[in-house]
Amino acid sequence: MRNLWLIIKNFFRHLWQGLRLVPYLRRQQIPHVLENFTKRERNVVIASLLVIILSSGFLINELFADDGLGPNYGGVLTEGLVGQPQYINPVLAPASGVDSDLSRVVYAQLLKFDQNQNLQPDLAANLPEVSADRKTYTLKLRNNLQWQDGKPLTADDVVFTIQTIQNAEYESPLRANWTRVKVQKLDDVTLSFQIREASAGFALNFTLGIIPKHVWGELTPQNFRLSDYNLKAVGSGPFMITEIKKTSDGTIKSVNLKSHADYFAGEPFINRLTFRFYDSYDNLLNAYQGKEIQSLGFVPFDKQAFLTANDKVNQYQANLPQYEAVFFNLSKAPVSEKAVRQALWLMTDRSKIIDEVYKGNAAAAFGPILPGSLGYNASIEQAAHYDLTEAAKILDKAGWVLGPGATVRMKNKKPLEFTLATSGMQMLNVKTAQILQSQWEQLGAKVHLNIVSSKDLDQNYIRSRNFDAILVAENVGADPDPYPFWHSSQSHDPGLNLSGFNNSEVDKLITEARLTADENVRIKNYARFQEIINEQLPAIFLVRSLYIYNTPKKMLDVNLSNIVAPSERFADISHWYFSD
């Protein structure tokens, strides 16, 4: 590209130098000059002029057809997903990966992440202004924003979206982020957000899709989830829904979208986008291999066909701020006993999970703050080890005895027995749970697996905290603030403290860390916080994984290195395009 530009630059420089001499050539001299040419020389001059004209055209065309400056408009991208869309609505979508994916391309956000996980404006005109006490955020929207139905998008829509999330009757998964926030409209494009306590990571909440008040404003909470607009969504993002295809039994087969010509950031280069839905990863992979779909991601890594690279595929591996862990319900015996949790921790071989489930495409996780994040404590990782003998001694000392010929330990005539629940939608979870079951039963623990749907897991286990142990993934976001996951005030729904962990020192450490802008204080507090979690073991942290994404070789300008969530792979989809 650089060489091409230098050629063009030199060509026009020489051309300009020649044109500057033209005024010094008197008109009456031109015929005399031509008379001095032979016929052959005159033909050469004419041919040379034609070559110059044609070369100029070809050079300019090549310049603007180059990958960096001349993306092509058009083309259809077809992606496969496992599951069914239900709520293409950012107020409800975070509970489902499928809903989150579709919502991300239909709805624009106030702010969005760049590839370095830094915030940048989206619907907002700029980053928010923060008051001196860091409790008031002022945000301005871009001028002349529109919804996909042509109606104006204003501050009223933002206020409506946040107040809907705050209302418990709507059951938004985002409610915990906004419960103590007062939002006010200052004018049609300006809003004020007031929080009760300063929070180092509060601005991350602005990565929020906004819904239109004129569509949703008249619906009651009871009808909100039942509305057709949860599928026939009206957003402000780069793509708009045009068609939903269903089978005779009502199962959604595909959702078709077209580029939004009036998208505020510019019309996307891809003309059409289609999502097709499958009920299992096996069927998804069959569709991929049969060329029914062109792109897919987050597929179980035991599918070797998916991992095989070839010259027709671009494969991206994006870092996610996400870990998979087993959370123990600290109110349920026998996992309420620290000695039991310590023994299970010692009997957890993460390398086996990484090798057999993830085929090496993951790294071990040892605590609630991941490597590379602010305040990561490397000593926690160094303390982790696998030791059956040590684990058995801990249980023996605590009174959990394995009698002669017995396979299950007993204490006070009660077995060391509990249930581990997880979602069956992800084979990664199922296979991990099976490995844990095998490892822990070597110790004399009887582990029952309860494999349920994602919806069932959320509604009947997580929200009610009705479990002994639960295997789930938690995305901690771009800021490592552990408050939503570990502060005692977050022990009940919609809080995310799944274990019911309650420690006054931890509460003080993580509250102080989120109230300060001093990174040194946050680093010190987070280091101690991780030590306490590692001592008390309310959870066993297993792996942190990559997000694997396959696209066609001809799909260009896809930039994936770090993403906050899988749906964020679409953050810059309006820039993607097909080469010729």
Image: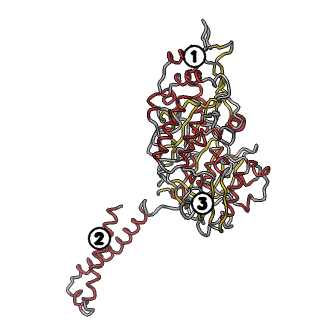
Q: Secondary structure at mark 1?
A: helix
Q: Is tag 2's residue or tag 3's residue first in the polypeptide sequence?
A: 2
Callout count:
3
Q: Is residue 434 above or below residue 442?
A: below
Q: Which residue is mark 2?
A: 10
Q: Earlier in the sequence, mark 2 or mark 1?
A: 2
Q: Quadrant of the N terminus?
A: bottom left
Mark seen at residue 395 = 1
For label 2, the SS is helix
Colour basis: secondary structure
Q: Which residue is mark 3?
A: 259
Type of the residue with mark 1 = Leu
Q: Residue furthest bottom?
A: 28
**Position above or below: 1 against 560:** below
Between marks 1 and 3 in the image, the one whose residue lies nearer the viewer: 1
Looking at the image, can residue 296 be seen?
A: no
The residue lying at 53 percent from left, 18 percent from top is 391
Callout 2, which amino acid?
Asn
- Give the Cα separation between the discs numbered 1 and 3: 61 Å
The residue at the point 59 percent across, 62 percent down is 138
Q: Residue furthest top?
A: 404
Q: Residues within 10 Å of mark 2 (few under 14, many from 20)?
A: few
Q: Which mark is in front, 2 or 1? A: 1
Picture coordinates of residue 415, whole percent (x, y)? 66, 16
Q: Determine the residue located farthest toward the left in the rendered image.
A: 36
Q: CA distance from mark 2 to mark 3?
A: 39 Å
Q: Is residue 111 visible?
A: yes
Most foreground residue, 378 or 514: 514
- Looking at the picture, tell me which residue is in the foreground, 519 or 451: 519
